[in-house]
Every structure is written in structure tokens, then in C-alpha cells.
Image (tube, coloured by chain):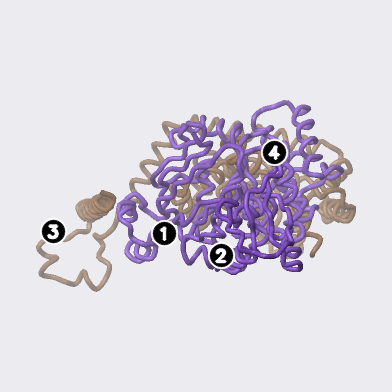
Amino acid sequence: MSKIEINNIYKIFGNNPQSVLPMVQDGATKEEVLEKTGHTVGLDNVSIKIEEGETFVCMGLSGSGKSTLIRHINRLIDPTSGDVVVDGTNVMSCNPKELIEFRRHRISMVFQRFGLFPHKTVMQNVGYGLEVQGIKKDEINITAMEKIEAVGLNGFEHQYPSQLSGGMQQRVGLARALATNTDIMLMDEAFSALDPLIRSDMQKQLIDLQAELKKTIVFITHDLDESLKLGDHIAILNAGKLVQVGTPVEIIMSPADDYVKAFVKDVNRAKVIKAKTIMTPSNKFKGKDKSNNRIKVNEDQFLEEFLSKVVCTDATVEVVDKKGDIKGYITNKELESSLIKS
Amino acid sequence: MKKNKKLYVNLGLLSFFIWLLIFSYNSSKRKPENVGELLTDFSWLHQWPKWLDLPLMKYINIVFKKLNETYGWIFEAINNFLLWQLMTLKNFLILAPWPLVVLGVAAIAYFASGRKVGTTVFVGFCTFFIGFLHPVFWTKAIETTSIMLISIFLCITFGIPVGILMSRSERIRDKILPVLDLMQTIPAFVYLIPGIMLFGLGAVPAIIATFIYAVPPLVRLTDLGIRLVDKEVTEAADAFGADKKQKLFGVQLPLALPNIMQGINQATMMALAMVVIASMIGTRGLGDEVLLGLQQLNVGRAAEAGIAIVLLAIVLDRITQSYGERLQARNMPAKKEKN
């Protein structure tokens, strides 16, 4: 069973969403619905399964419904129809009290524009999730300090958010989400408001933290590079519809439609594709190549890491696994087809 | 379903209107002897006919009289309670030596403004000048201030909760907004005089009238302040499992506080504007000095009292305003640096 299951979610914005639902279920497009009823379709039959311990990235342009989708998981938004099941419990059937408990202990969230409390210090912000649980102040401060250190903000704990830079503010947001020690973390365009250098810094920090904590992270972004970097699985949304779900390589190598193609067009494939993805397995390799130059490469290495060597020496790559057994070969032919295809 | 409901409501309102017309016609003493006359003689279309007159006056008078007779004890209780509060406050301030009061006001300004020396000295001098203008003004100013403080206290205890309710529900807001409009536009005398009948002459009807006049801006600004709190911030509170109470007291109210303080400031200023009007129903204070001066055609005396009122306004405005500014600065120091 998956950690989070989103089943056939429909979300329609407007005065009387229920009346429009059948029309959307019958397959009317967003434009038709808007024209005929004045309602906006936010999400159109989205189903996603998210496994425990993975980083799941939802990607799409603005207006594609990705932020709406993430808010269904902790029910900041109620769907027009559909279920969200977390660990076998249907979040939609929770009463208000259960919902509050669920939000306190099971799920935390990081916001695009940080969502920090401007009237609270960094320490109080980080401890907020614990404060609403009614935990004693000393204990809150100990945990909060721990998390502040984890994100590298020591010495700033008594500052107010507005005294910090954007990157530091988002670290506070991250620390606040970590403080409640929930196993699910929602990140709504968490790094989109940061400048590129700080963004890649934060991405690295998140990857490091994730390697240690193994949380289930649902990450929203409109940046493909970011999603390729962070995601174990990527879901691509367009106009409220789910277009494709897959691993980064699947998205790159076989985009489902033109929308995804346009997305992946400018991506540096060598950064994403691993040797094992494009190799010709050794049993199928006919040994056509005559060069004696051979390079050994681990199957999990990215193309980028050995590409220049191959091109310079015109060598054939032997792809080996951890034990050193040859699994397959890569020649110029494979490189060409994988890198140029678009 | 929804459309039907609206239709029924509208039909109901229409029949109520027709009933009102018939009722007014029947109870009018100046109606034509025969209804048929209306169809033959059309002169009633030229001038507003005497019989087309809603007998509201009669019924309001009846209700008001009933209210006074049967529920008089309630008003008396309110009267006694407010009067007791007023007297305690007033006597305390009058009995205290005046230099102490001046220093006390300056101290409040000092702490409210976040230890700004300039504001403190300015407020202290303004307070001093009230008495300096005319010794009588000191006691009168204290009387006025006491009435105002009690009114503002009433405004806060009623206005802020109503503002919170409005911010939470569109439906409640739609119902309360016209009431606020009514309170702000209805001429003060319309409720001042009935106030006298219910509470007797003096300070209490003035307090009630001031309350009615001054509470709308506070309600509006509380409502606005809470609704203006950044949506992502309230969302964050929700996402971490804050219940309604924790969200209100921990996030919404503290962040709306600059606006609420602005509301209190506005309520204070409007309350001061009421002072002169209230003096016409025998409320003692700076207002009655203005009134006396005008009645005696003593322009100097009226002007002096007028200046005293302005000084009092400045003192109260500086204190509430600087407190609001300080809150604002705490919430958004980054913005302040840019200015």
C-alpha cells in the first residue's frame, strides 16, 4: 500500500461546483466549462500514488493546479469529489478534531513565500507546530534549537523573520516543518522565490536532510531541473489534468505528449541519464566496434561524468555493476540517439 | 432549489409591502371616504397624498414608552453601573495631584511609543497646556477624558468581537455592515434625546451616544485587519494544526493589531468630536465650556476651550498612534527601513 493515495480528485472553483461536476466528469474541457458555467476547473480526475520515503515532485506551469493538488493532501482545500488516503486513513472522512490531530502529527508544510509568522522570532516560528500541540516551552525550545542548527541558522534564533534574507527565511520554514517530526512533508514551490545560487544550495541541503531522515516529501515546482534533481518520481500536470507520472529518466526519454516534450526540450540530458539506461545489454551487443579503447564505467554514473572522455578518445564504454561484471556497452551510436533525440 | 427560495423571499417581501400600503391607508385619518374616489379623482397623483403615510411614529412612541415603563430597571442598572465606573475613574484622576497626572500621561506615552523621547515630551507639554490655558479646564478635561475612556472601553469590548465575527463569515458581515452605516449616518440627536429619557440627564447617555458614534470604525478596521492578514500565514497556522482559537489569538489578532489600533485611534477621535454635542444634553466637560462661551458670545472663551479639546485629541492620538506604529514596525521592520 502506498503512503499517500490520491484517488480521482476533482476540484472545481465557483458558486456551485457540485452542479458542474457531471459535466467535467463527462470530459468537458476547462475552456468549455468556464464559458458555459463560469466555473474554473482546478483539478480534473487526478490520481497519484506516493510511496513511503520517496521525494515525489509535482510539476507544471502556473495555473496547472499543482498548488491546489498539494493542499488536498492536508485538506487545506476540500475536493469537489474524490479521496485522499494517507496510511490507509481517508483524510476526507476526518472530522475537524481528527483533521487537526492529523495536521499536527502526521504532515507538515513549507510554503512558497515562506508563510512565517512576522510577529514571532525564528525560535518561536520553528516551535509553532509544537506550541499548538500544547508542549511545554522548555521542550519546544530544545527541539526548535536542534532544528535551527540542522538548517544552519545558529545565532539567528532571536531575530524576526523580516530581519533575515529570503534563503534564511525559507530555512526557518524548513526547520519549522522538520520540528514536528512528521513523516510527510509538503513543499509548495518551496524554493521558487529564491535566487538561483541559494536555490541550489537549499536543494542540496534538502537532499542531504532527506538522505538522513527518509521522509515522504511531496514537492511542487515549475522548474524541471529542480524536479529532476530532487524527484524519485515526477508527476506532470497541465490545466488540472495529470499528463505523465514517471521517474526522471522516463520523463526525459519518453515524454507522453507535446506539453511534456516542450518541458524537457532544453534539459541537459547528460545530467539526468545514467549509463545503465542507454547501454546495449552485453548479450545483445554484437561487437561491431573495432576500436580497442575501452573505458569502464559504473552503471549508476551519469552520462555527464564520462561523456567528454568518450568523445575525446573515441572509446567504447563498458558498463559494469558494483561487482565489476560487464552489464553492457555504450558506443557513439547509443550516445548519439540518447542525447540528440527530442 | 436555490432560485425557488429567492423567489419565495421576494414574493413574501412584495406581499409585506402591499400589506403595509393597505395598513397605512386604513389607519390614516385623512383617507377619502370611498376607495372608489381614488379611481375617479386623480388629484392624489399630483401631490403626495396625506393618506399614503406609514404610521411608524405612533408605534415607535408606543414601543419606546413600553420599554421605559417595563424595562426601566435594566436601563437603571446599566446607568448605575456606568456611572459608578465613571465616578471612580473621574474621582481618582481629580484627586490625584495634577503634576502626577501629567507625568503619568507622559509615562504612558513613553512606553506606548517604544521609548521615544520626542513623543513623550510633546505629549507631556500638551497635557500641561490643557490646564495652563485655564485652570478650570483641568477638571473639565478629566471629566471629558473619563467619559471617553469608558466609551472607548465599551467600544473595545463590543467592537472587536463583532469585528472578529464579521471577518469570519460573509453572511454576518452582510448583516452588520448596514447597521454600521446606520450608526454612522443617523444624526446624533436622534439617539441622544431618547438616551436622556432612558438614562436620565448627564454622563451616561453621553457615553452611550459616544459609543454608538465611535464604534463603527473600530468594527470595520478589526474586520479589515483580520481579513488582510497574509493568506499564506493563516494557511501555515492551519497546516500545523492550529485550532480556531489558537489561530485567532496566536496569529490573526496579533497581525491585525496595527489595524485594530488604528480603529481604536479613530474611535477615540470620533468620541472627542462627540464631546461638544454631548454637552448639549448637560454632560459636563470641555464641551460645555465651548457651549457656554458660544452662548455668552464670548468667542475667546469658546476658542480657548476648543483649543483644549484639540490638545486632548493630540495627546490621545499620539499615544494610540505611536503604539500602533510600533506594532507595525515590529511586524514589518524591513518596510520601515526603506522609508
Mark 3 and mark 2, same subunit?
no
Chain the render paints brown: B
Is residue B312 visible from the viewing direction of this image?
no
Residue type, numbered disc 4: Leu
Residue type, numbered disc 2: Phe
Which residue is the site of mark 1?
A40
Which residue is the site of mark 3?
B33
Query: Can you give x and y, in whole percent of width and height, for residue A283 in the image?
Result: 57, 51
Image point (72%, 48%), residue name: A118
Left or right of B18? Residue A252 is right
Dot 3 lies on which element? loop
Structural distance between the alpha carbons of marks 3 and 2: 86 Å
Tag 3–tag 2 contact (CB < 8 Å)? no
Structural distance between the alpha carbons of marks 3 and 1: 62 Å
Residue type, numbered disc 1: Thr
Left or right of B250? Residue A78 is left
Q: Which-is-in-front pick, marks 4 and 2?
A: 2
Residue type, numbered disc 3: Glu
Query: Can you give x and y, in whole percent of width and height, for residue A191 in the image?
Result: 68, 55
Quarter of the image that includes the C terminus of chain B = bottom right
**Colour of chain A as rendered:** purple
Mark 4 is surrounded, within 10 Å at the Cα level, by few (under 14), some (14 to 19) or many (20 or more) other residues, namely many
Image point (55%, 33%), residue name: A102
Query: Can you give x and y, in whole percent of width and height, for residue B129 in the image?
Result: 84, 55
Structural distance between the alpha carbons of marks 4 and 3: 85 Å
Which residue is the site of mark 4?
A178
Q: Is residue B84 above or below residue A42?
A: above
Mark 1 and mark 4, same subunit?
yes
Dot 2 lies on which element? helix
